[in-house]
């Protein structure tokens, strides 16, 4: 990776980067010594090549797990072909996506034979799918996903883990998922996403099969997303939708049978009772924890639904065929998950309600994911690399190490961004602002945003921690701004980003999903404005349980959990600004707790080295300096 290496010889614009070399050496050492490694690699480090190069050189069968499909595609379409060309001819790699990306021939044929005409666009969607099947090389449904083939139809023609018959399926030889798995088995490097990786881990740990081939090393990129995905994977959930899909699949694939139909009606009846009670408890937010009294109230209803499901499982298991066996097993699994969900273990798991669209669900989530990962992964394999552009709260990787339950001896590196942040950016925090809980806060935010946009001439992301504030501020400003104004929810995420660049100078008002994984290099994005520090809501059931656990261990939950996680969130949001060495712009945080509270110093330290100001005149001078620069600098 140095100035005389094969990459420099092959790439005209390759420049050796100190941080990239340091990271590559650390990864090589971790692979040799079989010791876990965590590396925060700032934007512009070139971290993908920094881990892939030693992986390729090691010859180890390796899984690269990413947080997003975008990065998964980038690794497979850009960096791996490059390394295969210039470093390791003959290198074999494969991409394995989630089940929702592969057409399931068994379900597709069943649906095509008996289409649900109540599903909008079913017939035209089937025609589009048939023509796509004939020409697709990759078999990846992302190629056809969209207006012609909507999500509802895709759910009918793909198979989730419960719906797949696996090795017992008579269509397995023509199955794109099975074919992708065969390719993965033969590859040196398999690129997956965290969801699939962790689902495989759970399957293996529970002895219920496997979704990935065996491997010798794992690289987690975008590793800051792992705790959230692991919380979902190592929990259980029973939703109205899971129940209705089970009954729908049963009707399509099995029977008719009198005892089965009678049992199904009982399941429907008990399901209405149980989910009706959940809905009544969901409250206005539709997202809340269940206390002991509430659990005691719904437990008998869950018991009745569980018994009805067991009866259904028995009724179906008398019938012939793999489909009947699968439906019976699914009914039994829902009954078991239901039983678990209403009996959380205090300090270990939390039961909570979630409203999803018009449906409702009960979930059971682990308070800590570390013990699950330790049991299923760390005890099995030592060659583990966790990397991301944002993992450290300040210069401390400890909170993320503990969150993932990694051993204390995990090696740690923070490789700074090669960008000149002190020159390329300025951090603006107004000195006089109402507190975020104050009713005057929203209009004060609007006033500040208006002033900053005047200086940046639009070209800004305005990021909010709540939909309510986003809607209020965008409604106040959109009518008067002379720039194209885009508001999250007006169009899908990628479409909004496309318009943001195309219509530049423009302004995007958005919430959580735009705080990370969004890349707009160049002057189209010259300001990132954040309304307030992104503290997790303390009444979120999982946050509350994790705080309580920390307190029970003698730690201050706010200092050890809320602050580090909010620092990471803020770094993610503000990290949207500088994507290349030529980008420049203002980072604005309109929450002056950054200046007035003792914990504010921890945030400011993490955001250094952007120079701090509370004076808009400095921001004006910063932009004037930009305008004075020759155009080539932009
Ligand atoms: S193996 Fe699973 S995904 Fe493939 S056709 Fe059969 S049921 Fe569908």
Image (tube, rainbow, N blue to C red):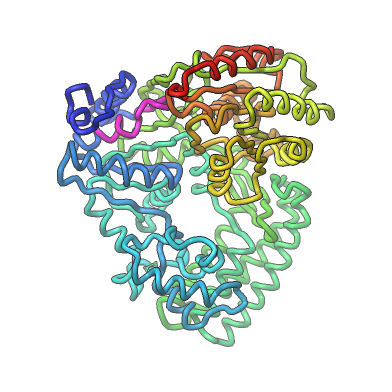
Location of residue 621 with respect to 40 vertically, above or below: above
Residues in magenta?
37-53
Residue found 60% across the figure and 67% down from its top: 243
- Please give left or right for residue 302 compared with residue 200 in the image: right
Determine the residue positioned at 34% across, 20% down: 19
In the image, 612 versus 468, the foreground residue is 612
Tell me the quarter of the picture where residue 75 sits: top left
Left or right of 572? Residue 31 is left
Locate the N terminus and report the quarter of the image it occupies: top left
Q: Left or right of 535: which side holds 101? A: left
Going 66% across and 55% down the picture, which residue do you hit? Answer: 356
Q: How many marks?
A: 0
In the rendered structure, does residue 448 fall within the stretch colored magenta? no
* Residue 40 highlighted magenta (yes or no): yes
Q: Quadrant of residue 309?
A: bottom right
Give the x, y percent position of residue 268: 66, 73
Farthest right residue in view:
439
Residue 233 at what x, y percent from top left?
A: 49, 48
> Would residue 577 be seen by someone viewing this image from the given angle?
yes
Picture coordinates of residue 96, whole percent (x, y): 35, 53
- Asked if residue 430 lies left or right of residue 230, the reply is right
Closer-to-camera residue (406/3): 3
Q: Is residue 114 above or below residue 39?
A: below
Q: Say if residue 314 shows up in the picture.
A: no
State which image quarter holds ligand 1.
bottom left
Q: Nearer the viewer, residue 90 or 396?
A: 90
Q: Position of residue 566 (x, y in %)?
A: 60, 27
| Residue at the left extreme of this rendering | 89
């Amino acid at each position: 990776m140095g100035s005389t290496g094969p990459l420099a010889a092959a790439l005209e614009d390759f420049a050796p980067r100190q941080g990239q070399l340091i990271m590559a050496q650390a990864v090589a050492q971790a692979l040799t010594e079989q010791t876990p490694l965590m590396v925060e690699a700032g934007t512009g480090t070139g971290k993908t090549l920094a881990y892939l190069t030693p992986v390729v050189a090691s010859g180890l069968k390796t899984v690269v797990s990413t947080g997003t499909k975008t990065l998964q595609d980038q690794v497979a379409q850009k960096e791996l072909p490059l390394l295969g060309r210039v470093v390791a001819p003959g290198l074999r790699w494969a991409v394995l996506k989630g089940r929702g990306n592969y057409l399931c021939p068994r379900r597709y044929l069943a649906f095509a034979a008996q289409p649900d005409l109540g599903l909008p666009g079913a017939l035209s969607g089937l025609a589009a799918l048939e023509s796509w099947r004939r020409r697709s090389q990759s078999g990846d449904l992302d190629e056809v996903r969209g207006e012609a083939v909507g999500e509802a139809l895709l759910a009918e023609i793909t198979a989730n883990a419960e719906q797949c018959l696996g090795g017992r399926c008579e269509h397995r030889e023509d199955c794109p998922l099975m074919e992708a798995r065969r390719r993965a088995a033969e590859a040196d490097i398999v690129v997956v996403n965290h969801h699939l990786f962790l689902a495989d881990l759970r399957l293996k740990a529970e002895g219920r099969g496997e979704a990935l081939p065996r491997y010798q090393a794992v690289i987690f990129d975008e590793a800051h997303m792992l705790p959230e995905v692991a919380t979902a994977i190592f929990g259980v959930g029973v939703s109205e939708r899971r129940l209705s899909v089970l009954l729908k699949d049963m009707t399509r694939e099995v029977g008719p049978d009198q005892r089965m139909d009678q049992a199904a009606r009982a399941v429907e009846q008990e399901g209405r009772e149980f989910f009706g009670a959940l809905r009544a408890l969901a409250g206005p937010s539709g997202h809340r924890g269940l206390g002991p009294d509430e659990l005691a109230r719904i437990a008998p209803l869950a018991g009745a639904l569980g018994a009805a499901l067991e009866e259904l499982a028995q009724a179906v298991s008398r019938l012939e065929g793999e489909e009947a066996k699968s439906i019976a097993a699914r009914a039994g699994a829902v009954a078991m998950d239901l039983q678990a969900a209403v009996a959380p273990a205090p300090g270990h798991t939390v039961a909570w309600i979630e409203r999803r669209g018009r449906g409702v669900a009960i979930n059971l989530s682990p308070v800590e994911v570390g013990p699950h990962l330790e049991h299923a992964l760390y005890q099995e394999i030592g060659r583990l690399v966790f990397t991301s552009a944002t993992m450290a709260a300040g210069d401390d990787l400890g909170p993320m190490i503990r969150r993932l339950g990694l051993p204390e001896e995990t090696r740690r590196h923070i490789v700074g961004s090669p960008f000149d942040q002190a020159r390329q950016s300025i951090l603006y925090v107004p000195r006089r602002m109402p507190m975020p809980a104050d009713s005057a806060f929203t209009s004060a935010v609007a006033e500040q945003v208006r002033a900053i946009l005047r200086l940046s001439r639009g070209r800004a992301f305005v990021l909010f921690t709540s939909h309510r504030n986003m809607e209020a501020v965008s409604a106040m400003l959109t009518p008067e701004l002379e720039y194209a104004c885009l508001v999250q929810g007006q169009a899908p995420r990628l479409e909004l980003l496309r318009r943001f660049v195309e219509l530049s100078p423009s302004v995007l008002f958005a919430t959580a999903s735009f705080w990370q994984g969004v890349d707009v290099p160049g002057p189209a994005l010259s300001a990132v404005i954040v309304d307030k520090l992104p503290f997790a809501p303390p009444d979120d059931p999982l946050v509350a349980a994790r705080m309580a656990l920390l307190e029970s261990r003698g730690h201050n939950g706010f200092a050890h959990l809320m602050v580090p996680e909010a620092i990471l969130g803020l770094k993610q949001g503000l990290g949207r600004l500088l994507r290349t060495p030529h980008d420049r712009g203002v980072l604005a945080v309109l929450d002056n707790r950054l200046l007035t509270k003792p914990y504010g110093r921890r945030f400011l330290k993490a955001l250094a080295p952007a120079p701090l100001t509370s004076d808009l005149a400095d921001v004006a001078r910063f932009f004037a300096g930009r305008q004075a620069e020759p155009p080539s600098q932009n």
